[in-house]
Amino acid sequence: MSKKKIVIGMSGGVDSSVAAWMLKEQGYEVIGLFMKNWEDDDDSEFCSSRQDWIDAASVADVIGVDIEAVNFSAEYKDRVFAEFLREYQAGRTPNPDVLCNAEIKFKAFLDHAMTLGADLIATGHYARVRENGGSFELLKAVDATKDQSYFLHRLNQAQLSKTLFPLGEIAKTEVRKIAAKLQLPNATKKDSTGICFIGERPFREFLNRYLSYQPGPIKTDDGKTVGQHVGLSFYTLGQRKGIGIGGMKAYKNADGTSDAWYVARKDIENNTLYIVQGHAHPWLLSPALLAADASWVAGKAPAPSALSAKTRYRQADVDCMIGEARDGNFALRFSDAQWAVTPGQSAVLYQGDVCLGGGIINSASDR
């Protein structure tokens, strides 16, 4: 019987490298695929794609698997980056990694892998897939500190049925140990952070190249104008640093200390940014939200029930009730008001370790 052929996305990072080695050890015929998703300025100091390709090819050589590079930058620009810009222009804060997984890594990449004769695909994400009664469930990773199911919540049955996540059952510390033991050339490489196409570059400077923007007033919750913003697109709810009100006198607490200022609201119609003082200000707390563009792992929305949710990555799950989902829209009500619920981010629902799917936050409610 011939070995199953599996195509794994190899980014040049330690996670996907160890995942590729694990699959080979498990007896699969493994082919590595390096995805190039961005090329506008990949010769700049901020874009690491050339080094990443060298690292991925070096690892493939060490572990003894074939690797090829494929350029998805046109698809990425069309399906992910254009939407990213649209959302920012509308004053929202999108999460391009969620869209990248749905549109590139598990669509364009999956399609390409199938043309190579693959039986399955794999990535170095920390998550798990479980078959249950003929359908497929997306589960959190065993290593809760690295779980990436939040970014994968838009995957569907067809995609999950073809996907393996080799790292789902092991801890990140174990991955580093394996990489060191195998003497992989990237064993000590730092994990990538930030948005894939922005890398470590200054974010505002990057957005400046693509967006039109209009300066406007910064106001406090009592309507007092205290400064000028550089364009609503450059701010996100809950932001504390870089607001541009340095030197502004803060209201003192009884003990003489003063609380920090936070971005609390964006009035798009009047091009006004509202800031409030204090982490626990009521404008920063939302007991409910409305979401749209829902995607459900099982192919249908969960019935109105008690579940848990995340409204941002790295947030602990919080108890919530989901109302009736219609036309891709749903409402959540939380047992405890949530801090800085941000339009454009994803609200992702869980039942224990099972990720059910989610949608894009449209608005938060303070009622």
Image (tube, rainbow, N blue to C red):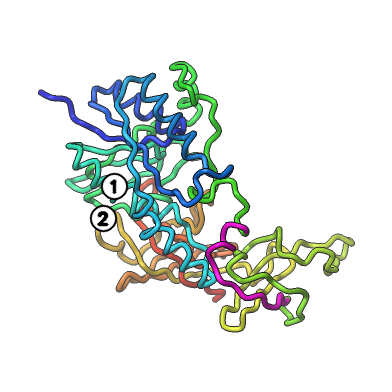
Residue 67: name its quadrant: top left
| Quadrant location of the C terminus in the rendered image | bottom right
- Which residue: 40% across, 57% down? 77
Residue 215 inside the magenta-drawn segment: yes
Q: Is residue 222 left or right of residue 355?
A: right
Instruction: Looking at the picture, tell me which residue is in the foreground, 64 or 364.
Output: 64
Q: Earlier in the sequence, mark 1 or mark 2?
A: 1
Residue 185 visible within the image: yes
Report the residue marked by disc 1: 137
Q: Amino acid at mark 1?
A: Glu
Element type where label 2 sits in the image: loop
CB under 8 Å between callouts 1 and 2? yes
Q: Is residue 294 left or right of residue 27?
A: right
Report the residue marked by disc 2: 298
**Which residue reaches farthest right?**
256
Q: Amino acid at mark 2?
A: Ala
Element type where label 1 sits in the image: strand
- Which residue: 60% across, 78% down? 267
Q: Which residues fall within the magenta stretch?
A: 205-219
Q: Is residue 126 above or below residue 269?
A: above
Residue 338: name its quadrant: bottom right
Instruction: Looking at the picture, tell me which residue is in the foreground, 295 or 185.
Output: 185
| Quadrant location of the N terminus in the rendered image | top left
The total of numbered circles placed on residues is: 2
Measuring from the top left, give residue 20's x and y in whole percent.
34, 28
| Pointer 2 local density, CA inside 10 Å: few below 14, some 14–19, many at least 20 | some
Measuring from the top left, give residue 115's x and y in whole percent.
19, 42
Residue 333 visible within the image: no
Residue 24 inside the magenta-drawn segment: no
- Which residue: 32% across, 20% down? 64
State how far apart marks 1 and 2 are (Cα).
Answer: 7 Å
